């Protein structure tokens, strides 16, 4: 589902991604772990072309993201074409990014109606099902300010799933939450994984990574230091840098 081939990203003179090779098979969960500033969130943003890669190739479901290739040369696609690609990729951010002036239900139906052209009744019926799946059917008419952080993040996940994406990206979805609210969001993510959703997750929740991920990749300094089975990487890391990082968390 995701195929990163020597993906590089620079911001001016600063090279943030230094030749990332990463494959995420369909129906699997890959967790990216590593210190702040290692390039994890930047890689995630490149996958749906919120950031443009500087070099390499990045494919989602066999489609080159952000560019067309002709005779070995890359040409950036239009904003409209990029938005069409992005519609198939759900993304959940650290901050919930809900529309403050819309209810939970209205937040969820906005994109299906205006991007996918779904009728309002169908969109609302589906949104209510999704709210029930994230345990918030009783909060359909609540505004974001009336919801806890954990509830807002669950609405944000439901909003992303409402677009029926083939891939879900999570950028540290629990980092802005109070500790007692983390579990409710991770439960929703576990359910998505059990339903076969392909997921790429940036997280510091090592227990979640160990339990849910098919692959864990440790990033540092813009490179993937090591990747593999969660129990191998987390419990028996081969690189000293990975061991040092994990010892500070576990």
Image (spheres, rainbow, N blue to C red):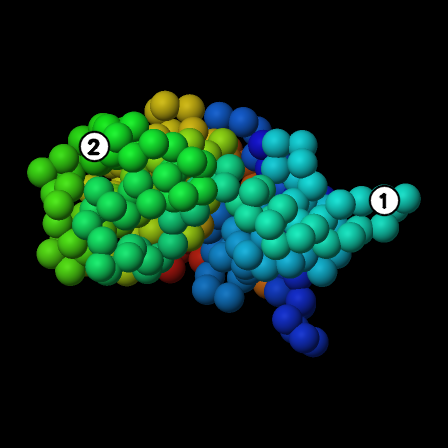
Query: Vertically, is 53 above or below 127?
Result: below
Q: Nearer the viewer, residue 69 or 5?
A: 69
Residue 190: where, in percent of width, then height? 31, 33
Can residue 134 be seen from the camera position used here? yes
* Residue bearing the label numbered 1: 70
Can residue 244 be seen from the camera position used here? no
Left/right placement of residue 119 relative to residue 146 reads right
Residue 56: where, in percent of width, then height? 74, 51
Say the numbered circle drawn on residue 113: none
Q: Which of 121 and 166 is in front in this view?
A: 121
Query: Which numbered disc flags the more N-terminal residue, 1 or 2?
Result: 1
* Residue bearing the label numbered 2: 128
Q: Quadrant of residue 194?
A: top left
Query: Vertically, is 67 above or below 232?
Result: below
Q: Nearer the viewer, residue 82 or 215?
A: 82
| CB atoms of marks 1 and 2 within 8 Å | no
Left/right placement of residue 196 relative to residue 24 reads left
Q: Quadrant of residue 54?
A: bottom right
Q: Residue at x 14, y 35 (%)?
A: 137
């Amino acid at each position: 589902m995701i195929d990163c081939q020597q993906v590089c990203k620079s911001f001016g003179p600063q090279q943030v991604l230094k030749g990332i090779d990463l494959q995420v098979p369909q129906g699997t969960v890959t967790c990216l772990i590593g210190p702040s500033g290692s390039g994890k969130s930047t890689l995630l943003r490149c996958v749906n072309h919120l950031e443009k890669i500087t070099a390499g190739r990045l494919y989602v479901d066999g489609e080159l993201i952000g560019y067309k290739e002709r005779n070995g040369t890359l040409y950036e696609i239009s904003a409209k074409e990029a938005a069409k690609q992005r519609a198939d990729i759900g993304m959940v951010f650290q901050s919930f990014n809900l529309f403050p002036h819309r209810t939970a239900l209205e937040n969820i139906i906005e994109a299906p109606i205006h991007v996918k052209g779904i009728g309002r009744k169908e969109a609302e019926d589906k949104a209510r099902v999704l709210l029930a799946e994230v345990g918030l059917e009783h909060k359909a008419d609540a505004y974001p300010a009336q919801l806890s952080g954990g509830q807002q993040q669950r609405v944000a996940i439901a909003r992303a799933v409402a677009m029926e994406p083939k891939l879900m990206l999570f950028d540290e979805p629990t980092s802005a939450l109070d500790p007692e609210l983390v579990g409710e969001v991770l439960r929703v993510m576990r359910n998505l994984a059990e339903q076969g959703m392909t997921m790429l997750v940036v997280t510091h929740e090592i227990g979640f990574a160990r339990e849910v991920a098919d692959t864990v990749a440790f990033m540092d300094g813009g490179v993937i230091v090591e990747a593999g089975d969660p129990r191998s990487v987390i419990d028996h890391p081969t690189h000293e840098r990975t061991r040092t990082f994990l010892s500070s968390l576990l």
